[in-house]
Amino acid sequence: MLSAQRAHVGRAAASVGTTVFSGDVLDTEKLGNLQVRTGAARLLLASSSRVTWGAEADVPAATLNNGSATFSTANAKAFALRAGTAVIRPTGDEPSIGNVAVLNAKELTVHCTRGSLTLTVADDSLRIPEGMAAHILLDPDAKVPADAQKEWGTKRPKSSGKNKFLFFWIAAVGAVTAFAVYKALESPDRP
């Protein structure tokens, strides 16, 4: 463990240097955080979040039960994050950074800030490119909540090919990023 503030491994307080084993439950309190390193990957658990540590096809992995987590990897076999029935992993051997937030048992958001990520549910996959985010509905037969319609737009989410999940592209992420880059590159001599 690289850092821990207001965090636990099982019922014990987490501390720097703690070894994490398969099956361990890691959680953070409100205003807490925890960072774990495993080989070529790091996992940062945000406040009020919980994961169960394990492996996914011989790759270090964690299952995000609630809250949000950010992970960074150096290659495709460095780490996988499970959230509900979805598995999120790097697409290729390039470095990648992703953030996953569990909204409820059937919904999550996945944001890729570097490289690209692949979200897989059963045999259905979605590639999330760098700079994009997606709102994922894991049960395609469930109705989209009315408040989600207001927040994410008025269109029904796009259906993936085999209907294992539905998704919304979150376009605001790209617009905000473009505006921030524009402002950062603007000349100080120009008002």
Image (cartoon, rainbow, N blue to C red):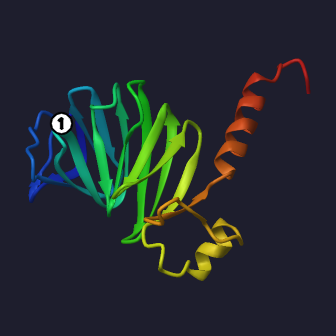
Q: Is residue 1 left or right of residue 152?
A: left
Residue located at (9% from left, 59% from top): 11
* Residue 10 sits above or below residue 152 on the image: above
At 11% across and 52% down in the image, what residue appears? Answer: 24
Name the residue: 69% across, 68% down: 153
| Count of numbered circles in the view | 1
| Whole-percent x, y for residue 31 in the image | 35, 55
Tell me the kind of residue under disc 1: Met
Q: Is residue 48 visible?
A: no
Quadrant of the rendered image containing residue 184: top right
The spot of residue 1 in percent (x, y) is 18, 36
Q: In the image, is residue 94 above or below residue 132? A: above
Q: Residue 27: x and y, percent? A: 23, 56
Q: Report the residue marked by disc 1.
A: 1
Few, some or many C-alpha atoms within 10 Å of disc 1 (few <14, some 14-19, many ≥20)? some
Q: In what quadrant of the picture does the C terminus appear?
A: top right
Extreme-right residue of the structure: 191
Q: Nearer the viewer, residue 86 or 29?
A: 86
Secondary structure of the residue carrying tag 1 is loop
- Observer-nearest of 110 and 179: 110
Question: Can residue 162 be seen here?
Answer: yes
Is 141 displayed left or right of 168 in the figure? left
Q: Along the horizontal axis of the image, is 65 left or right of 168?
A: left
Which residue does the image show at 41% across and 29% down from the upper left?
92
